[in-house]
Amino acid sequence: MRYHKIRKMDISNGPGVRVSIFMQGCTFHCKGCFNPETHDFKGGEPFTEETIQKVLELCALDHIVGLSILGGEPMHPMNIEGTTALAKSFKEKYPNKTLWIWSGFLMDRDLMDKEILNYVDVLVDGRYEQDLYNPTLKWKGSSNQRVIDVQASLKNNKIILYESELAAV
């Protein structure tokens, strides 16, 4: 597994100041993708235990409210094991900070049996669709994508949208 880059302070991928990591590799190749340089599974840098430790150290700062994991595709079968290890380590170390993940896979169709959901606070799911692009949407690029409160969804056994998403509906 590989990653593309780490942002030490990101204010565009989730609420507040966050650390973001962009995983490397995606097979969706959505038309108009904002990050096509992450599609090649052979690009970027090796994702190792040292990468996880670096991300955790960056998240230790008091002004960092959470971690965002994007791509590429963090939930791709070639990436999900490493993404899960990072998510688990993050939530164990920082239970009061939030974990957001963006994925082209759908939670209720593709991810319900995945361990990683135990650690995710918010999942933005669905492939980006250029024809449904709307620059006024918060946390997502196209109107087909959902901003999901993962823990509420698991508890209620149905998709529950994140509260800021409800205000936009």
Image: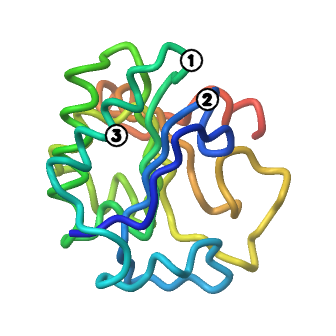
- Residue with the mark numbered 3: 55
Tell me whether the residue at label 1 lies in contact with that at label 2, contact meaning CB atoms closer than 8 angstroms.
Answer: yes
The residue depicted at 68 percent of the width and 81 percent of the height is: 32
Q: Residue drawn 25% across and 52% down?
A: 83
- Horizontal relation, residue 119 to residue 97: left or right: left
| Mark 3 to mark 1 CA distance (whole Å) | 15 Å
SS assignment at label 3 = helix
Disc number lying in front (2 or 3): 3
Marked residue nearer the N-terminal end (1 or 2): 2
The residue closer to the viewer here, 4 or 150, is 4
The residue at the point 39 percent across, 35 percent down is 150
Q: Position of residue 155 (x, y in %)?
A: 30, 25
Q: Nearer the viewer, residue 66 or 60?
A: 60
Residue positioned 65% across, 54% down in the render: 140
Q: Position of residue 168 (x, y in %)?
A: 77, 38
- Earlier sequence position, callout 3 versus callout 1: 3
Q: Are marks 3 and 1 in contact (CB under 8 Å)?
A: no
Find residue 37 and report its horizontal and vertical position in percent: 52, 80
Residue at the right extreme, as displayed: 136
> Could you say which is closer to the camera, residue 42 or residue 83?
42
Identify the element where label 2 is drawn: loop
Callout 1 secondary element? loop
- Of the residues shown, which amino acid type is indicated by label 1? His
Above or below, comparing residue 147 to residue 64 in the picture: below
Q: Nearer the viewer, residue 83 or 117?
A: 83
**Number of numbered discs present?**
3
Look at mark 2 in the image and give the residue it sits on: 17
Read off the residue under disc 1.
Answer: 63
Question: Residue 11: which quarter of the image?
Answer: top right
